[in-house]
Image (cartoon, helix red, strand yellow):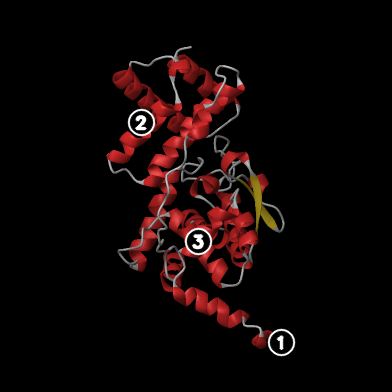
Amino acid sequence: MLLEDVLKEFLFDCKLRRLSERTIKGYKNNNLAFFRYINSEFNIIELEDVKYTIIQDYINFLSGKKLKETYINGIIKCFRALFKYCYDEGYINRNPMDKIKFQKQPITITKTFSDEEVSEMVMFYKGNRFLDIRNKLIMVLLFDSGIRNSELCGLKMTDIQETHINIMGKGKKQRYVPITPTINKYLIKYLRVREQYIKDKNKYETEYLLLSQKGRKLTIETIERLVVEAGLYAGVRSEVRISPHTCRHYYAQAQLRNGCDLYTLSKLLGHSNINITKIYLQSMNEDGFLEIATRTTPLSNL
């Protein structure tokens, strides 16, 4: 069976399972790059001829290009998805990815915003216009719920409940985050101006919570731009990446500093494995650990 034929079938299956366009694009591009390599180096175009040694050779080739371990592991995940599909469909008797191990990733310290920078960023958007109030709510949601950028864009009116927000995360996994007093304050204000803004406008995509000036679903790029503008205003340190995902890092570390346990935080962030959540713990500096230890010392809590 031709590799490109099975890839087309696999990608169609991914669409049926409603995987994100970004995920499907990654599966397609990374597997096609692998196909081109093994065709050029080994003259292989058939699925049955792909052995684990061939895949390992390609991974070694990528490592030789000094690519980051996290990047290579992302490619390995794409291969795993494709060959698992082939095995499940009975196209191959053995899955060559079973012998392929992930690259060992170095522990990296993720620098995030300081409390002062977050306060300034949230205060940046002010005013009573629809866009001003919307932008303020966006910043509050990013910092006080740990929501991902794509999840924020996809929030619908029906996701807003009385005490919590339903979030459809990666892999179509649903989770819940509380509507904190701060979120509730700006949510009430936004919903009030939103109702007036969309009044008598039939073509607006009113099923979504956050709308653009033209009444459309917000894009990832728009939220990235809003965060960068707020970060520049706040004078965020040069070593800190100004992005929505850094807001998520801040949320996670702040929750840990304030005494939230890893299991609860893992559920709030929508992680499938608590080991993923531990990365945020590893990124905390010594002051963060000392603050927690001081607040939770046994004798002080007798």
User: How dense is the environment of label 1, judged by Cα within 10 Å: few (below 14), some, or many (20 and up)?
Assistant: few
Position of residue 189 in the picture relative to residue 21 (left or right): right
| Amino acid marked by disc 2 | Tyr
Relative to 234, 151 lies left or right? right
Marker disc for residue 84: none
**SS at mark 1?**
loop
Query: Looking at numbered disc 1 in the image, what kind of residue is underneath it?
Result: Leu
Answer with mark 3 or mark 2, whichever residue precedes in sequence.
Answer: 2
Q: Quadrant of residue 230?
A: bottom left
Give the crowd class for mark 2: few <14, some 14-19, many >=20 residues within 10 Å: some
Coordinates of residue 115 in the picture (x, y in percent):
45, 72
Q: Say which residue appears at 45% left-offset and 24% top-offset.
A: 51
Please give the name of the residue rendered at 57% of the width and 59% of the height, measured from the top-left corner. 145
- Determine the secondary structure under disc 2: helix
Q: Is residue 272 above or below residue 118?
A: above
**Residue in the foreground of this view, choosing between 268 and 67:** 67
Sequence-wise, the earlier of marks 3 and 1 is 3
Q: Mark 3 — residue?
A: 280
Residue that mark 2 sits on: 58
Query: Which residue position is annotated with label 1?
Result: 302
Per the image, label 3 sits on a secondary structure element best described as helix
Number of numbered markers: 3
Q: Are marks 3 and 1 in contact (CB under 8 Å)?
A: no
Which percent across, then down, holds residue 121?
Answer: 42, 65
Nearest to the observer: residue 233 or residue 170: 170
Lower position in the chain sequence, tag 2 or tag 1: 2
User: Is the residue 51 above or below the residue 286 in the image?
Assistant: above
Identified by mark 3, the residue type is: Tyr
